Image (spheres, coloured by chain):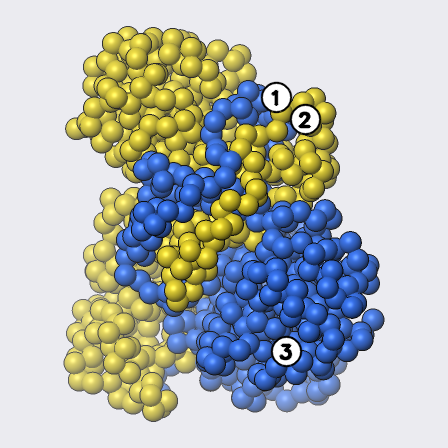
Chain colours: A yellow, B blue
Amino acid sequence: MAEVGAVGIVGGGVIGAAWAARFLLNGIDVALFDPDPEVERKTLEVLANARRAQTRLHGAALPAEGKLSFAASVAEAVSQADFIQESLPEREDLKQRVLAEIDAAMPAHAVIGSSTSGLLPTKLQSVMKRPDRLIVGHPFNPVYLLPLVEVCGGDQTSQQTIDIASALYTRIGMKVLHVRHEIDGFIADRLLEAVWREALWLINDGIATAAEIDDAIRFGAGLRWSFMGTFLTYRLAGGEAGMRHFLHQFGPSMEWPWTKLVGPKLTDELIDTVAAQSDEQAAGIGLREYEALRDNCLVDVIHALERSDFAAGAVAKAYRESLAGKEAVKLGSDCGDGHLLTCHTPVMPEWIDYNDHLTESCYLKLFGDATDVVLARIGAGPDYVASGFSFYTVETHIRHLGQARLGQKVEVRSRVLGSDGKRLHLFHAMTNLDTGTLIATGEHMLVHVDAKAERSASAPESIAAAIRGLADEQQHLAPPDGAGRSIRMPG
Amino acid sequence: MAEVGAVGIVGGGVIGAAWAARFLLNGIDVALFDPDPEVERKTLEVLANARRAQTRLHGAALPAEGKLSFAASVAEAVSQADFIQESLPEREDLKQRVLAEIDAAMPAHAVIGSSTSGLLPTKLQSVMKRPDRLIVGHPFNPVYLLPLVEVCGGDQTSQQTIDIASALYTRIGMKVLHVRHEIDGFIADRLLEAVWREALWLINDGIATAAEIDDAIRFGAGLRWSFMGTFLTYRLAGGEAGMRHFLHQFGPSMEWPWTKLVGPKLTDELIDTVAAQSDEQAAGIGLREYEALRDNCLVDVIHALERSDFAAGAVAKAYRESLAGKEAVKLGSDCGDGHLLTCHTPVMPEWIDYNDHLTESCYLKLFGDATDVVLARIGAGPDYVASGFSFYTVETHIRHLGQARLGQKVEVRSRVLGSDGKRLHLFHAMTNLDTGTLIATGEHMLVHVDAKAERSASAPESIAAAIRGLADEQQHLAPPDGAGRSIRMPG
């Protein structure tokens, strides 16, 4: 099946606009239709938020943005689309009517994903001429950041349709959860709804306020839920005896009246109470400010989970690697001018200061990474370090000549200035590839050490020979500007 | 009221042992009683986990550990305690019997917190001679990391008891949620129970597996729940129209049968199914490995939320500051020998390499922080930067002379080597206070810049005068060893 190149979005509310942003930021063109006269302003606002958040999350690993156009009709939005994401209000009759319209206007190869959070695909597709082309692709707010998408087919959905949608959602950084049995609320919303109804009862019965209920989640189980669900959490709570013991122990409490079946009746009085408590909780802080805070926290939490390569962190990491794989920059290879290419990266969100500039200590981090590439090249990489030997940096000299901003790409080219069998003298030059300027140089003296004995020692002949070989390859290079400098006041 | 200095723990299971660890790591002595012959081994295992996790979370900001002793009886565990944490199995008759025993043996001023997750304090205290001394202090697993503790008094609990318990829990880094109305399951467990029962129904009805249900949480709402609860999340989902609009929109769905009241009957068959799915999900990875992964993720997520000073991140930050405040190291002041004290910190978890050593680039980070302290001292701090002027580092020279490990304290002492009204020449010396050795020096040339014009400019007279004043105070210091060096191969 050909890769999706153009997406049509029908319905441009909070969900539809965020879908548009996610596709666009993955280099896919989007045509969007919504009858709202303000659709353009609202969509561009969501896109700006999404661009900021995704850039913080993935840096310049993201491909060039796709093109966004606003269609004048459903037919115009879908007629050139390989994939259509329907994000209309949650009314079955409305969705059925428009899905039939989409079906009639879209290309023969196209597939439709419906964003419905609870309507059954079998019912939605029942009015379509090509019902096999519909699946549910149910996302979570904010769609441009949360990875989860529930994919659920109806009775007439084809396997090919499921495969096309799953591949597309995965390609744009999402985690596909295949809902194998069509039920109201699918899987995630049943759990969300259980919490929501219980929470409303707690307010209805005067037990706790909105802010207290939120605190009960975010300072406790919510922290665990960001990377483990309910079952893995309770497995650990069961201790050495495990899940079976846990279940037996809690069997009796299953019949205690700790949750209520349906939510409380949303009377005017209850709505007043909840709305007032929500206002109090928000403490006058506006929606946009909270959205920015939410997005910052989500990005930081996902980055945090990347440290363990787990849960949403593993999805983000794999996604970024899938994007990076397309570039195929090979570190440690010759740049063509005799230098080694030792670093090639966008400036990542963790590396910037409050001005969005690459921060001072990160220059040394990148030079340190470049040094590691040189060391791997001469046979002193991680395996060698694991064997108990290594090169330690004993002296560093950095010149700051320019700057790099978030998302700009920087490159480091490196060379050996000298070696005596124990010492290794390196020189790195960092260029901002977006501006084409040299922004820093790093000069370093390293000493070969026996890490266990904690003392310097001559490098083995294999490494010494590799250093000599590299130095020979680079001996035609002119001495670098700025090497051998000391820091002094002029005059 | 006097500060709690000694705690008695009655019941040393997963919860009791983790309570012991949290108190100990906050410098509070603990006497623990549990009839389990293996209590010592199990408690020390939990303490080792907790020590590792809390050190990653807070570094050496933690005070010296308290002393742990294992008592031979309930009376021995509580007779010298200012505070008792009861963590017995969840049986009302058992808890009532032992609480009466504790009450009889504890000092007159002592207070008891019960870890019960659902029994009512009014019933628990009904058999006590001093019922006013009992509250519920309900924690969440792992107790040594999750900040939430629900504090709930019974009919006879005194305000003083609530105040003592709340102050103690806050002091050890927890977030107190005061449950104002005594109900089964308090607040948090009602929400957890709603999710748990719904999740068991999904398995019972064959809709989804344990792993799928966990994925439905951790890739979606769970990420939001780590810092916002249900209400703030839905407030944002309501968009510009807010919570009231959201509620009106969702009113009808409240009566859809999306959750079930009580959990399914835990038949042997259902237990078999859930246990088997849990085993499959765990994929042969052992309990301890998962616990370490969970603790790593929790620490990283809490650190991530510190970036926005929000939710659990705000609690951790305030807690660490409350600990740091006790040391009262004043940065920017004279060390007594003419140098400025510009950095005094434990080596934090984010700063170390795979060997637990302070990583190369973090030396420059700490020297950069030290430079900021010098700049603040001469009137070029954040306010000055906000006005559009600043000093930029143009050249850096670092010598690495030693190392520092996770949790060891390092200090930087700084001096001005020269200035000409535009340039500022600084020298920093970093000492590992735990080993008493000089581990690095940093020499830096800075240039005063007009940030908007993006060019160098003379510093204003007020700053130039402040630099001269500082240089005068330091002119009696001998020239520092290692200043003015350039990097060269010897010979």
Is residue B202 visible in this depiction of the protein? yes
Callout 2 crowding tier (Cα within 10 Å): few <14, some 14–19, many ≥20: many
Callout 1 crowding tier (Cα within 10 Å): few <14, some 14–19, many ≥20: few
Q: Secondary structure at mark 2?
A: helix
Q: Secondary structure at mark 3?
A: helix
Task: In the rendered structure, find residue B248 and report the number of the disc placed on it.
Answer: 1
Circle 2 sits on which residue? Answer: A271
Q: Residue at x 54, y 88 (%)?
A: B435
Residue A273, image quadrant:
top right
Mark 2 is on which residue type?
Ile
Mark 3 or mark 1: whose residue is earlier in sequence: 3
Left/right placement of residue A286 relative to residue A427 reads right
Circle 3 sits on which residue? Answer: B74
> In the image, residue B425 lies at what x, y percent?
60, 72
Circles 2 and 3: CB atoms closer than 8 Å: no
Image quadrant containing the N terminus of chain A: top left
Mark 3 is on which residue type?
Val
> In the image, residue B62 lies at what x, y percent?
61, 74
